[in-house]
Image (cartoon, rainbow, N blue to C red):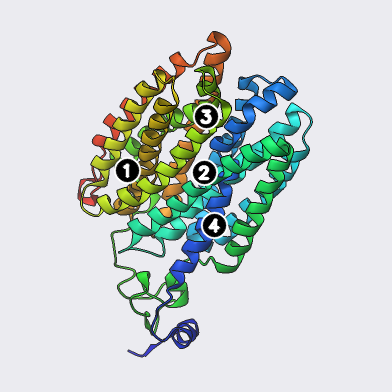
Amino acid sequence: MAVAYTQATVDYMRMHPRRNVYPGWHVLTAVSGINFANGATTIGVLTVFILPFADEFGWSRTEIAGATSLGALLGAATALLTGRLTDSFGARIPLVIGGLMVVVAMVNLAAMQTLLWFYLAFGLARLADQGFIQPPSAPAIAKWFLRLRGRALATLFFVTSVGGVILPLVVQLTMDNIHWRAAWLILAGVMVVFGVIPTAILVRRQPEDMGLAIDGDLPLPIRSGDSPTQPSGSAIADEEHWTLKEAVRHPALALILVSTFAVGIASSGVGLHLVPFLVQQGLSATLAVGAVSIGFLASGISNLVWALVADRYSTRYLLALNYALRAGTLLLLLRTDTPAMAYLYAALQGFTEGGIRTLGTLMLANYYGRRRIGTIFGVSRAVQVAGFALGPLIAALAFDLTLSYSRAFTAFFLLSLLGTGLIMVARPPSRSATPE
């Protein structure tokens, strides 16, 4: 049978005769950049604005939280579409669209004058975040790496966390020295420079489209009758692949989704209200924002740690451990009233956050393969985002009714325990055990 290389492969081999530069690293760089800039849309940044918004506009915390929930719900529905889009056409289109949406949202947030304007602008930012940027990011990396998948995903999440460390501090410094409106414009510029431009230039769908094997080990020869985008060879048989229809017939996916929903409620419910809670406990706003940044820094470091540990131990057990530790941090938070305790909570919470993000993505990729990982991850992300939408509202309503977060945070503790139990019994799927 005749064997030939595609023109893309020939060009690649000519440009990189020693194969030192695998295009997957270019994709990783660009996707990491847009996720760094996407920190502008996170609850960790919005929490810095809650007190200035309350002072200037008189908005309640429930009113502010409603914008995050609205955008999150829209993003949850969109994630189902972008997951399929990533599998079929690659991550570049949704990522660039999402980045441009963030830019438009940031500019409008800088100019807003009414609560409705805020809802439209920040809702657009959260839609871009939850519907167009986060759902395709991890699958984009998983499609380019197998042997180094854990480390590549850890790098993505580490850079994402660095954005969570730096951007809240940039916002606080800008607010202290200029105005909160200027902070939104700076965030828009960050997205253009670090997100939209590199993504548009560097991101591609998968190595097979370039006639390459996953991880860049060897170029894949095209045999007569093969499709250029679906070549024969080891890259197609590198792992067991599941479609979404096959995955939903096994209980593992349902258990994973319910646990993800429960922990998502707890995570976002605390995140949006952390700065106001710590200020209520007697800390200054600057110290409270510092705790947010410490949490993101710990998350970034732990991404790398958990990725290395996952090479040796079950991702399921490690993820359950992270959920249990998350529950423990909530008990600590309820008793936090000093800077030392706040920073300890932030470090522990960030350490578990990094583990949940890295291990959760690895678990899906390891359970179901990479061919339809965009679609399956999109479903998981939609369920998680639905939890994200409920968490801030639950905490805000509890505070507005009782002037305390204690009941909401206790409920989040119980939800984290529920997630721990569910993930423990989510055993790897087996086709032989799947009902016909």
Marks 4 and 1, the one that precedes in the sequence? 4
**Residue at image location 68% in from the left, 22% down from the top:** 54
Badge 2 vs badge 1, beta-carbon distance below 8 Å:
no
Percent of width and height locating residue 22: 42, 73
Q: Secondary structure at mark 1?
A: loop
Inspect this view and state whether residue 233 appears.
yes
Q: CA distance from mark 2 to mark 3?
A: 14 Å
Q: Marks 2 and 3: which is nearer the front?
A: 3
Say the numbered circle drawn on residue 33. 4
Q: Label 1: which residue?
A: 249
Q: Nearer the viewer, residue 261 or 411?
A: 411
Give the residue at the far bottom of this rendering.
Answer: 2
Residue linked to disc 2: 164
Query: Which residue appears at 53% of the width and 51% of the height?
Result: 35
Q: Which of labels 3 and 4 is toward the front?
A: 3
Q: Are marks 1 and 3 in contact (CB under 8 Å)?
A: no
Residue type at the position of mark 1:
Arg
Q: Position of residue 104 (x, y in %)?
A: 72, 47
Q: Earlier in the sequence, mark 2 or mark 3?
A: 2
User: Crowdedness of circle 3 by 10 Å Cα count: few (<14), some, many (20+)?
Assistant: many
Identity of the residue drawn at 35% across and 33% down: 259
Tell me what residue is drawn at x 56 percent, y 36 percent.
Answer: 72
Taking the image as shown, residue 393 lies to the left or right of residue 425, namely right
Circle 3 sits on which residue? 288
Amino acid type of the residue that numbered disc 2 sits on in the rendered structure: Gly
Tell me which label, 4 or 2, sits earlier in the chain.
4
